[in-house]
Amino acid sequence: MLESFQEFFRELANTHPKWNFIYLYDPAQAERVLSGFWMTIKLSVVCVILSVVIGVVGAWLQGSPNKIARNFVQGYIQFFRNTPPLIQLLFFYFALGQFTPTYSPDGWLQVPIISNVGWAIISLSFFAGAFNVEIFRSGIEAVPESTQEAAEALGMSRLQTYTNVVLPLAFRVSLPALNNNLVNLVKTTTQAIVIAVPELLYQLVSMYNDYSTSQRACMVLMFVVYIVLVGILVAGMNRWERGMRIPGYGG
């Protein structure tokens, strides 16, 4: 069965050279696609989690009585919201990367302790996190002040009020906007190609540079994979939103 499947696409490549689905009959190219796919998944998952954490912490600091903390968060938001993520990737990798400490695994080669994958995670997480801070801030503002005052009257600290009362309610209000931002983040991971992160786009571009007849087939695969990835994320977020909905609260 597998051999017939591979033979079909091998014959298709011979009869229609512009539609060479080489990754469906060449094991080496299939391995490249799979490795790129898994790198995309890892990059997306880690960046999504870190960006949400940054958003939650940043939104809390925005309400801090400490002016320095508030100004720091505001400066962070302005920097990452007002510069393109592509420029941020290049800045982190080529500018800040020059100051990264190195280690020598073999006593000769110097390897930075933060790889290109690490810089991509840092850059993209901070980029999406800046938007998440504002998303959670708007959710926090939707929580009635009387609710916060009631928690404080029960003897809760500011942190306890935030984590046990305010954040759970704000999260429900923030989910629709958070959904949109996380979808954009997953799509933005393709820009990691500029610092040679071996994600799916990098592998497919390398493939059709080696086999020019596979360009169309590679772009079809790229389109389908991201449609599926984003569809799964949206479906999961929508289901989570329905599960967390409180009747009469947050729409």
Image (spheres, grey):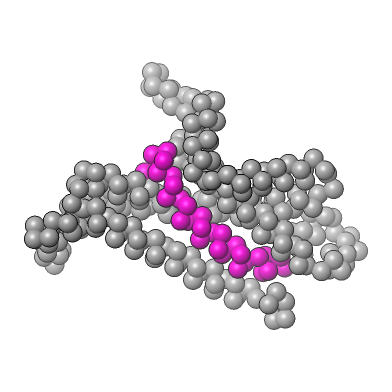
Q: What is the x, y in percent for residue 87?
A: 51, 40
**Residue closer to the observer: 141 or 60:** 141
For the point 49% across and 71% down, which residue is it? 235
Asked whether the viewer can see residue 96, the reply is: yes
Which residue is farthest right? Answer: 153
Which residue is farthest bottom? Answer: 247
- Is 192 one of the magenta-colored residues? yes
State the quadrant of the C terminus.
Answer: bottom right
Which residue is farthest top? Answer: 108
Q: Quadrant of residue 1?
A: bottom left
In the rendered view, would you say 104 is above or below 223? Answer: above
Q: What is the x, y in percent for residue 67?
A: 82, 43
- Is 19 one of the magenta-colored residues? no
Q: Quadrant of residue 232?
A: bottom left
For the point 80% across and 60% down, which residue is it? 161
The range drawn in magenta is: 169-198
Q: What is the x, y in percent for residue 60?
A: 74, 53
Tally the marks.
0
Q: Majority secondary structure of the magenta segment?
A: helix
In the rendered view, would you say 221 is above or below 172? Answer: above
Q: What is the x, y in percent for residue 10?
A: 11, 58
In the rendered view, would you say 86 is above or below 167? Answer: above
Asked whether the viewer can see residue 27, the reply is: no
For the point 34% across and 63% down, which residue is it? 224
**Residue closer to the observer: 39 or 142:** 142
